[in-house]
Amino acid sequence: MLPAGPLMIEHRLIERAVSLFEKESEVISSTGEVNLPLLSDMVDFMRTYADRCHHGKEEEILFHLLETKDMTEEHRIMMTKLVDDHHRSRALTTSLNDLLIPFRQGEQGAVEEVIKILQTLSVIYLDHIEREDKHFFPVAMKYLSKEECDTMLDQFKEFDSKLIHEYYKMEVGRIKSTLEAKK
Ligand SMILES: [Fe+2]
Ligand SMILES: [Fe+2]
């Protein structure tokens, strides 16, 4: 298998999730109500799966190795644009989480902004995934030797195996600071 394989499998789950973002934006538009637990889960999915797990492997392993290759200007520009998309989605997810703060405190928040971010994330991701699947990954794989592909598949597995430990280490830190803030 090529390293694009596991990344493309992850794309299918991200596509399913962002299509639900679009649906939730429609529900909020028609009811005017924000489903806080659902949106908190969506923020968690974007942070933990789409960003840390998926973009993490792309940026820290695949793109990192491609940086050392003699890529054409066109391919380098494609990769830079993909990294810019990751930054944009990270910023949008942070903004979405910030917009949830008043709702968590039982106050009315900026409903229209929440709708806008959900729709933007959905549009950005569907386009981003299509560019990776159909345009960038096919050319990117050609820069890698068979040995580099095999090593990268192992690195992906190792990266994933560390995630749950990293996640819960952060969670314990978060719980600790919440408790300390209440003292
Ligand atoms: Fe990406
Ligand atoms: Fe991707």
Image (cartoon, grey):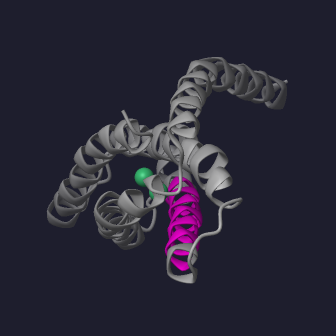
Residue 94 sits in quarter: bottom right
Q: Would residue 3 be counted in the magenta stretch?
A: no
Is 1 rendered above or below residue 57? Answer: above
**Left or right: 28 as drawn, with respect to 137:** left
Q: Position of residue 129 (x, y in %)?
A: 34, 59
Q: In front here: 20 or 158?
A: 158
**Left or right: 84 as drawn, with respect to 9:** right
- In the picture, the quarter occupied by the C terminus is top right
Q: Position of residue 161 (x, y in %)?
A: 58, 18
Q: Position of residue 157 (x, y in %)?
A: 53, 23
Is 164 rendered above or below residue 72? Answer: above
Residue 164 sits in quarter: top right
Q: Position of residue 10 (x, y in %)?
A: 35, 39
Q: In front here: 37 or 76?
A: 76
**Left or right: 63 as drawn, with respect to 109:** right
Is 138 rendered above or below residue 3? Answer: below
- Give the total number of marks visible in the rendering: 0
Give me the residue at 56% from left, 58% from top: 90
Give me the residue at 65% from left, 61% from top: 69
Q: Which residues are magenta?
A: 77-97
Q: Would residue 89 be counted in the magenta stretch?
A: yes
Magenta stretch: helix, strand or loop mostly: helix
> In this view, which residue lies farthest toward the left?
30
Give me the residue at 61% from left, 52% from top: 59
Q: In front here: 31 or 20?
A: 20
Give me the residue at 18% from left, 55% from top: 23
**Left or right: 168 as drawn, with respect to 136:** right
- In the picture, the quarter occupied by the N terminus is top left
